[in-house]
Amino acid sequence: MSNREKDKSIVIKEVQKVYTFFSSNKIFSNLIPEVRTNISAALSDVKNKDDIAAIEGRITIINGYPKACGDIKFGMSNHTARLLLTTKKFDSSINIVMNIKYIPNLIEKLKLTKIKMEEVLRNNQSHEIRVSEDSTMQWLIKECFEKIGKIPDIIWDKGAVGKEPMIRLFGKSSDDLILLLKQILELIK
């Protein structure tokens, strides 16, 4: 097995580890947004979305439980892959991202923790960004980085016309995301 194949196997296991953590937890279903959830993890030498593993078809809710619609494969994500690709331009240590549902009460509870988080106001996007295909995630990361000089654990927004509000989680590894998810699940019980 080549080094690249080993790297791919490790990255797939990172996504699998996060998914396994919450897949049998019915409470997690409350965190799945209308656009559904995905987890994206990048190869160390990531160049484009084909170097990012995610769950094909995202994670939905079946019989009240979070359920992957497909397998973990490279090149499957668009939204979370673009988010991760842009994030890595500002902080190369971030290797995994995930999106969850925006819940105002959860944000208020998270503000009382030590989790580093930042709100981005999507209404600040220019008209060109709003109407340009696949440019919103890049803008969101750049906006946050310019505002606070780093990528926090969580970037959230209240949405905009035609854009669902969202919470995005960032980590160096699956363990970072799982730690964040443990704290979030405690807050929504």
Image (cartoon, rainbow, N blue to C red):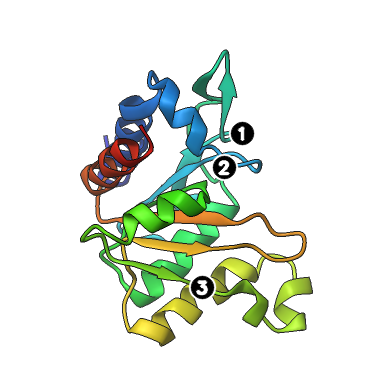
Whether residue 47 can be seen here: no
Callout 1 crowding tier (Cα within 10 Å): few <14, some 14–19, many ≥20: some
Q: Residue at x 77, y 82 (%)?
A: 127
Q: Is residue 90 visible?
A: yes
Distance in Å between CA atoms under marks 2 and 1: 8 Å
Q: Callout 2, which amino acid?
A: Met
Residue 109 in picture, x, y percent from top left? 34, 53
Query: Residue 72: x and y, percent?
Result: 46, 32
Compared with residue 105, is residue 56 higher up or lower down, i.e. above or below?
A: above
Looking at the image, is mark 2 or mark 3 nearer the viewer? 3
Question: Looking at the picture, which amino acid does disc 3 mark?
Answer: Val
User: At x 26% / y 38%, what residue is drawn?
Assistant: 182
N-terminal-most mark, 2 or 1: 1
Q: Residue furthest top?
A: 63
Q: Which residue is mark 3?
A: 120
Q: Residue at x 48, y 41 (%)?
A: 54
The secondary element bearing badge 2 is classed as: loop
| Residue 62 higher or lower than 112, as above or below | above
The residue that disc 2 covers is: 76
Image quadrant holding the N terminus, namely top left
Q: In the rendered image, which quarter contains the C terminus?
A: top left
Q: Are marks 1 and 3 in contact (CB under 8 Å)?
A: no
Q: Secondary structure at mark 1?
A: loop
Mark positioned earlier in the residue sequence (1 or 3): 1
Determine which residue is flagged by label 1: 57
The amino acid type, in three-letter code, at marker 1 is Gly
Task: Tell me where residue 186 appears, x and y as whole percent.
Answer: 28, 37
Label 3, residues with CA under 10 Å away: few <14, some 14-19, many ≥20: some
For the residues marked 1 and 3, what is the alpha-carbon distance in whole angstroms?
A: 27 Å
